[in-house]
Amino acid sequence: MTEHELIRGCIKKDATCQRKLFELYAGKMMSVCMRYASDASEAEDILQEGFIRIFSYIHQFKFEGSFEGWLRRIVVNSALKQLQKKRIVFKEISDHHDSSPRLDPYVYANLGEEELMKLINALPEGYRVVFNLSVIEGYSHEEIAQLLNVQPSTSRSQLVKARKMLQNQIIELQKIAV
């Protein structure tokens, strides 16, 4: 069954097609959820809410662009709605200069994907959300500000702080490895 046929079946509310679509994309979307959630249980809740929204609005998919991208956007929005319920506090910072030490590119190259994801997940919630939206999802600071109901300067400052914190964590890992 092609993706197009699967989507058409979901539009007709065919349970078999819905199950196949879920099985096809749940793993990838769970990875997205884990980036925004504080634990696996919360990620599962976000995933479930995301797929409820996907099946509710699948008739609006225009068959233009990437279907996976469309799914991802709904899942990210579901994660953001969940985070809004928790009332994330974003703090403004006044210094925008970068005093972080510079790392050699090999340090980043030797860091595995799993290690990097652990470091990102260990960031404070506000930093993690902005980092994910900006660096991983590719949203601009203006878009992030709109999504999170904050100022663009808050998004920028949270990203600067997240990057500094990640750099410091990587430096610590490098010291341990040496």
Image (cartoon, rainbow, N blue to C red):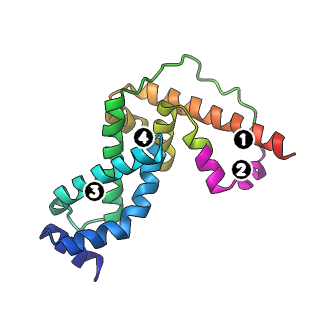
Badge nearest the viewer, 1 or 2: 1
Q: Label 3 crowding class (10 Å Cα cut-off): few <14, some 14-19, many 20+? A: many
Measure how far apart labels 3 and 4 are at the Cα level: 25 Å
Residue identified by numbered label 3: 51
Q: Amino acid at mark 1?
A: Ile
Choose the circle earlier in sequence order: 1 or 2.
2
Q: Which residues are magenta?
A: 104-118
Name the residue that disc number 2 marks.
108
Q: Earlier in the sequence, mark 3 or mark 4?
A: 3
Q: Position of residue 33 (x, y in %)?
A: 42, 49
- Residue in the image at 57% along x and 31% along y: 160
Q: Classify mark 2: helix, strand or loop.
A: helix
Name the residue tied to disc 4.
Answer: 140
Q: Position of residue 178 (x, y in %)?
A: 87, 45
Residue under label 1, please give it.
Answer: 170
Query: In the picture, residue 123 is in which quadrant?
Result: top right
Question: Which is more toward the observer, 39 or 176?
Answer: 39
Residue at x 22%, y 78% (from the top left corner): 5
Q: Residues within 10 Å of mark 2 (few under 14, many from 20)?
A: few
